[in-house]
Image (spheres, rainbow, N blue to C red):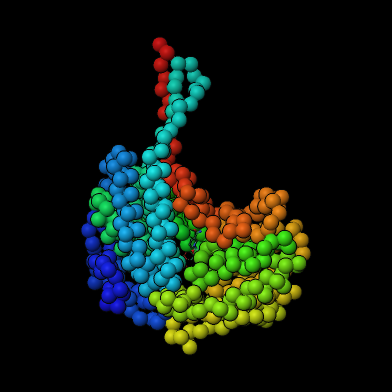
């Protein structure tokens, strides 16, 4: 813990207790957070168990009674203050991310600022959460709608964006008048606790924002089972999303699910190949390929495939692997050794099925003393039934498939149970419309490798989830739409 502490301008951001009802709750039961770049111990964090989870839910339920009635002007003021504090401390928060999950420090800092954008956007958006007056059928009546906060929201988040996945949910939820209980991933609790410290400084009343840590199988059932929790906001794998949805069904709780992806990256014959290659690099190698919107299948049209592979080879060979704290690093470690083994198995499967490994293709863990995999470029062979075409690679491996025409490319792109993000590189405006409409994905980046912004809807179709985060939609998710009917008006 000392090593990370010495990197921070504000070491008081480092917490190891849970944050419940406005105070820090410790426990003698702890779990370890380790830096995946070298296996060193970053911190020991308190496991507060089922009792702590119940306390947090109760505190959030009590606080909801006053927070929901707090004028939105005041709520938005505190939410905006939280945003300011996060941006002011972005460098420290970035260092915490790099220490606990490994991504390069510049990317980590960028994540903090990106995530904070959802908080400030939500503060403004909540100010405009107004209802409508509606025509009614019964004589002498009037009708109108109001948006009311859903209630206590349980937010369960993953390790790959330890800061942004919390801000993207909690900014809108808090601005809308909900109270929250956050359970971060056990690999990355420190980012969540630092956000709690800043929430405290921003002035949220006790119980409005809570962060709990412990075993998922203990905390999860409390969060999905407690009657006071009215909504589950989850980002993570499709498998866990399905489990939480089943658990939430008993209490008919609302669910917002941001799940796994299998993004196709389509490069058409008429595309700018250099631009497409830059796009693949940005989409594929950010966070060492561990993002839900990472290009999982690069599908190049025959006329451009060779040129694209050549352009990618040049770029992948130049990538520098290392600790996220080394300024020269483009690709940091994977989250842990099991992740390296998962990627290794996918690459071995591709090899046996005749794919050509053009760059990389091996674990670097033994050589580098951390959970590293070499940046890899693969050209798929005739047999396209690769395991990595149907499962998330979640590693720095770019695989190029070939296809002959537009129809074939759409068929391959949609041949997945997922539907989060897709990318399309073309200079034909007709194709832009035709193909973006045909792609069964919640977001399509056309000549653009990033699809997320605080002002726009982020979310998936099919098994990639339910609901949207960001923009006005992200705030509305956390509200109930109520209709009020007034009779006897025209007496
Ligand atoms: P994960 O294994 O599903 O875990 C996500 C979170 O759920 C963790 O906090 C985890 O805690 C918790 N969890 C697991 N089982 C639970 C249970 N039974 N009850 C309550 N909580 C439970 O996912 P991950 O490996 O951390 O993250 C990678 C996945 O997230 C990928 O599939 C990626 O595509 C997806 N993702 C999606 C988006 C999006 O916006 N759509 C964004 C980022 C990531 P434990 O680790 O303690 O089990």
Where residue 223 sits: x, y (%)?
A: 37, 56
Looking at this rendering, what residue extends furthest in the bottom direction?
Answer: 367
Q: Is residue 152 above or below residue 342?
A: above
Left or right: residue 319 versus residue 13 is: right
Q: Is residue 367 above or below residue 277?
A: below
Where residue 239 sits: x, y (%)?
A: 52, 63
**Residue at x 69%, y 51% (from the top left corner):** 429
Q: Is residue 191 above or below residue 247?
A: below
**Residue at x 63%, y 77% (from the top left corner):** 313
Q: Nearer the viewer, residue 198 or 389?
A: 198
Left or right: residue 442 versus residue 251 is: right
* Rendered-image quadrant of the N terminus: bottom left
Q: Nearer the viewer, residue 30 or 74?
A: 74
Where residue 167 sits: x, y (%)?
A: 39, 56
**Residue at x 57%, y 54% (from the top left corner):** 443
Residue 407 shows in the view = yes
Where residue 355 sits: x, y (%)?
A: 69, 78
């Amino acid at each position: 813990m000392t090593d990370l502490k010495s990197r921070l301008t504000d070491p008081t951001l480092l917490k190891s207790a849970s944050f419940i009802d406005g105070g820090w709750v410790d426990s003698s039961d702890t779990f370890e957070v380790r830096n995946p770049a070298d296996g060193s111990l970053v911190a020991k964090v308190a496991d507060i168990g089922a009792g702590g989870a119940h306390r947090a839910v109760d505190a959030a339920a009590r606080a909801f009674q006053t927070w929901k009635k707090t004028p939105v002007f005041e709520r938005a003021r505190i939410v905006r203050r939280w945003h300011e504090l996060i941006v002011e401390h972005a460098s420290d928060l970035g260092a915490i991310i790099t220490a606990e999950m490994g991504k390069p420090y510049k990317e980590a800092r960028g994540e903090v600022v990106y995530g904070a954008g959802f908080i400030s956007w939500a503060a403004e958006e909540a100010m405009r959460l107004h209802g409508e007056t509606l025509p009614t059928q019964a004589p002498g009546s009037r009708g109108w709608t109001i948006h009311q906060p859903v209630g206590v929201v349980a937010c369960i988040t993953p390790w790959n964006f330890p800061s942004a996945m919390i801000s993207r949910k909690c900014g809108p939820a808090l601005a809308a008048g909900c109270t929250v209980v956050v359970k971060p991933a056990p690999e990355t609790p420190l980012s969540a606790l630092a956000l709690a410290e800043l929430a405290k400084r921003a002035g949220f009343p006790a119980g409005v924002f809570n962060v709990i840590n412990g075993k998922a199988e203990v905390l999860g059932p409390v969060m999905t089972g407690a009657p006071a929790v009215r909504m589950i906001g989850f980002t993570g794998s499709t498998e866990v999303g399905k489990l939480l949805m089943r658990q939430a069904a008993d209490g008919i709780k609302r669910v917002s699910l941001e799940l796994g992806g299998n993004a196709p990256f389509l490069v058409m014959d008429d595309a700018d190949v250099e631009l497409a290659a830059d796009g693949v690099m940005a989409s594929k190698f950010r966070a060492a390929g561990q993002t839900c919107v990472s290009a999982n299948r690069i599908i190049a049209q025959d006329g451009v495939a060779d040129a694209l592979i050549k352009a990618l080879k040049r770029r992948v060979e130049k990538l520098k692997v290392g600790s996220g704290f080394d300024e020269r690093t483009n690709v940091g470690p994977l989250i842990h050794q099991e992740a390296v083994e998962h990627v290794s198995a996918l690459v071995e499967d591709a090899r046996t099925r005749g794919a050509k490994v053009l760059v990389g293709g091996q674990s670097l863990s033994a050589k580098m003393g951390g959970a590293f995999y070499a940046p890899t470029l693969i050209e798929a062979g005739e047999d396209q039934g690769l395991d990595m075409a149907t499962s998330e690679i979640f590693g720095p491996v770019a695989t190029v498939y070939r296809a002959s025409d537009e129809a074939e490319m759409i068929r391959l792109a949609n041949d997945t149970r997922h539907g989060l993000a897709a990318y399309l590189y073309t200079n034909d405006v007709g194709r832009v419309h035709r193909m973006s409409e045909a792609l069964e994905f919640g977001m399509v980046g056309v000549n653009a490798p990033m699809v997320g912004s605080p002002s726009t809807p982020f979310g998936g179709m099919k098994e990639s989830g339910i609901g949207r985060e960001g923009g006005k939609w992200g705030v509305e998710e956390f509200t109930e739409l109520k209709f009020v009917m007034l009779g006897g008006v025209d007496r």
